[in-house]
Image (cartoon, rainbow, N blue to C red):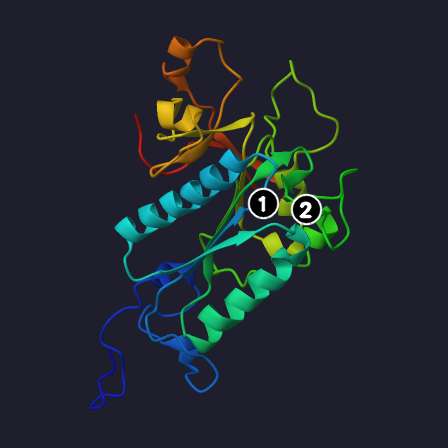
Amino acid sequence: MYDLQIGRTPTQDPHAENSYSMSPYSFLGNNPILFTDPTGEDLYLFYYTQGNKDPEMDKAALMAALTRALDVVNSDKDDHIVIKGISDLGKLGDNVQGDVDIWGGDKGFGKTKEFGIWSHGAFQGPAGSTPASQEAASPGGDQLSPETWGNIIFNWVDNGAKAGFYGCRTGKDPDDKKNPQSGDPFVQTISRNNNMKNVDVWGQTQRSWPSPYTNARVSTPDIVSGNQHMPTYFVGSQKGLPGVISRAMPTAAFPMAVYKNGQFIGFKQQPGKKL
């Protein structure tokens, strides 16, 4: 709100904590000619892979992205969320740039609060369903190099930004001696990039599986049949015991590993529905 009588905004920016260096009563950095932000709210960018070899992955990834979006809506209804399917990760950067320009620019929403991608994954990061059209890091050509990830312009908020990589082993457990990994985890590597400065970068420490809960893996009949629905989360878990009965029994989900500026911050359970 703006009071014409006093030439001031008598109410605080709802996300003033994202810019500690500025007054919570300032608007657009005191430069409304250059910047626009009619809502004062944030932008969320959620992408999922489609056209995977296993059709159930298409459904699971979509449902997981929608579930995270619904959780955001339930916590803050005024933020704007982009949900988009993608097969060629080489085009991800263009998609992010376009969404940032449209929704953070022309549409007037704020900067990016959170980025998430639901996909297959490995030590080298998320995997697309087709060969990437840009430089790839894996022999199959469906994963992007850390340098390519470093060229993506996310336009992060100044404080509290998050990037979530929900595919298998994107954030290997640094203390796991039984399953050693050569080199640093993917999320640690890209967290060193300039475009991830001061961003919490999350990755799975184990193989990733669909579950209706964030702190437990439960293979419901719908999940087993590939008919996932909301809520669906990608959680870290070991392969599990054989047998139909054991599939339905909850097993604890491994928390995700979080890195910032190349440093290991700790393990955290992703937000969402708990068992």
Crowding around mark 1 (Cα neighbors within 10 Å: few <14, some 14 to 19, many 20+) is some
Q: Name the element at disc 1.
A: loop
* Mark 2 and mark 1 residues within 8 Å of each other at the beta carbon: yes
In the rendered image, residue 55, in percent from the top left (x then y), is placed at 53, 37
31 above or below 114? below
Mark 2 crowd level (few <14, some 14–19, many ≥20, 10 Å Cα): many
Residue found at x 47% / y 24% = 254
Rendered location of residue 17, percent (x, y): 37, 59
Q: Split into 4 quadrants, where in the image is the C terminus?
A: top left
**Numbered disc 2: secondary structure:** loop
For the N terminus, the quadrant is bottom left
Q: In this view, does 5 lie above or below 268?
A: below
Mark 2: amino acid: Thr
* Picture disc at residue 51: 1
Question: In percent of the image, x 52 and y 66: which residue is there?
Answer: 100
Q: Which of 245 and 112 is in front in this view?
A: 245
How many numbered circles are shown?
Answer: 2
Disc on the earlier residue, 2 or 1: 1
List the residue tagged with mark 2: 130
Q: Please, what is the three-letter code of the amino acid marked with disc 1? A: Gly
**Can see residue 103?**
yes
Mark number for residue 88? none
- x and y percent of residue 80 in the render? 37, 62
Looking at this rendering, what residue extends furthest in the bottom direction?
A: 5
Please provide percent x and percent y for residue 110: 42, 67
Using residue 172 as the reference point, say whether residue 57 is left or right of it: left
Does residue 166 appear in the picture of this structure? no
- In this rendered view, identify the residue nearer to me: 115 or 257: 115
Residue drawn at point x = 61 percent, y = 40 percent: 187
Q: In which quarter of the image is residue 141?
A: top right
| Alpha carbon separation for disc pair 2 and 1 | 8 Å
